[in-house]
Image (cartoon, rainbow, N blue to C red):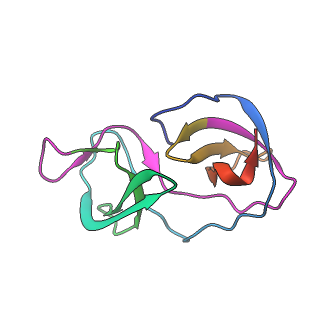
Amino acid sequence: MSRGPSNAQGQTARLIADHQRSYENPIQVKTGQPFELTDRIDIWQGYRWIWARDDSGREGWVPDALPDRSQTPATARYDYSARELDCAQGAQVTVRHISHGWAWCEMDGGDLGWLPLDKLAL
């Protein structure tokens, strides 16, 4: 569900530390879908993130490359979900995309979600 910058498609990675998702029902948008940007901004490991809300009321951090601000409200430049994976150290995943210090990964059972790069051995 997430696209955007990528340079490791299909690469296998192993978790070097446990990871627990930050929230249960994160923001999710499709290409062209309008969503609300807030004034909350965070710089995480050198990348700029913006707190946003979708039309269903789900919230979460989105990369600064996601919003197309040429319209009001902003629209999504690509499909995006802020869904993270719960994984234990040693788990193997397949990296599908990398963006803003995170990897969009697939687990053996097919679950998809983000994991921070600093917890992965590529």
**Is residue 28 at all visible to an observer of this figure?**
no
Does the stretch in magenta take in 63?
Answer: no
Relative placement, left or right, of 59 versus 117 is: left
State the residue lying farthest toward the right.
Answer: 90
User: Which of the two residues, 121 or 105, is positioned nearer the viewer here?
Assistant: 121
Count the marks: 0
User: Which of the two residues, 25 or 86, is positioned nearer the viewer here?
Assistant: 86
Magenta residues span 69-96
The quadrant of the picture occupied by the C terminus is: top right
* Residue 104 on image: x %, y %: 60, 44
User: Which of the two residues, 104 or 119, is positioned nearer the viewer here?
Assistant: 119
State the residue lying farthest toward the front.
Answer: 46
Q: Main secondary structure of the magenta part?
A: loop
Does the stretch in magenta take in 79?
Answer: yes
* Residue 15 on image: x %, y %: 79, 52
Relative placement, left or right, of 83 versus 19 is: left
**Is residue 25 at all visible to an observer of this figure?**
yes
Position of 8 relative to 41 (above/below): above
Residue visible at 39% across and 63% down? 42
Relative placement, left or right, of 54 versus 14 is: left
* Residue 118 on image: x %, y %: 67, 52
Position of 56 relative to 33 (above/below): below
* Residue 36 on image: x %, y %: 24, 61
Displayed quadrant of residue 71: top left
